[in-house]
Image (cartoon, rainbow, N blue to C red):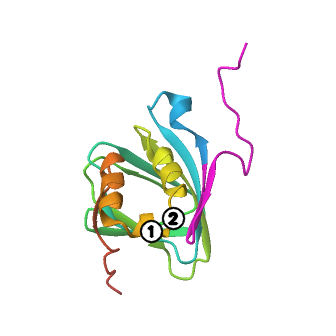
Amino acid sequence: MAPRYSLVLPGGGPNYGWSADHTFVKVSSADTGGQYTVMEDNLKANFALGLHLHRYHAETFYILEGSVDFYVDDDWMTATTGTCLHVPPGTKHACIMSQGCEAARMLMIYQPSGFDQFLAELAQMDEADFADEARMAALNDKYDIVSIGPVPERAVS
């Protein structure tokens, strides 16, 4: 009889390496029947994720190591190791590595699932696909990603 659980060891799981981060799927859409996905994201110094929202799914970020600046509903905050941030559906947000932080690692929970499938589709694309605005818009729509713009400027205090 096949086990009813999944075990993913450190460094394991489907993974996607990008220029600014390397993501590992720890609990997939298939594991949860589409209810949620758990991923580990290893951020590099140049990581930045532009302003966007999701109409139907929530994201939870738990910082395992390092420091990440989040922009959520017009507020800037710095999330350090041990910080947990929950972003409900319909909430605009962006994030960027904190100044002076060279690397960070965070656990991400998506509910309902689907982001793992988005990354799997991205991994199959080439540069021409990424440059195809209609294709990217359709993919974003399919996975509930509403792009709003770049990471907002952060006022220096």
Residue range (magenta): 1-24
Q: Point out the image quarter for the N terminus.
A: top right
Position of the C terminus, as image quadrant, is: bottom left
Count of numbered badges drawn on the protein = 2
Any part of residue 31 in sight: yes
Task: Please name the amino acid that badge 2 sits on.
Answer: Asp
Element class at badge 2: loop
At label 1, which amino acid type do we have?
A: Ala
Instruction: Give the camera-side residue of 156 and 123.
Output: 123
User: What residue sits right under mark 2 in the picture?
Assistant: 126
Reading the image, the residue beneath label 1 is: 128
**Disc 1 vs disc 2: Cβ atoms closer than 8 Å?**
yes
Residue furthest to the top: 1
Of all residues, the one furthest to the bottom in this rendering is 156
- CA separation, marks 1 and 2? 6 Å
Q: Main secondary structure of the magenta part?
A: loop
- Which corner quadrant of the image does residue 106 belong to? bottom right
Category of crowding for the residue at label 2, using alpha-carbon neighbours closer than 10 angstroms: few (below 14), some (14–19), many (at least 20): few
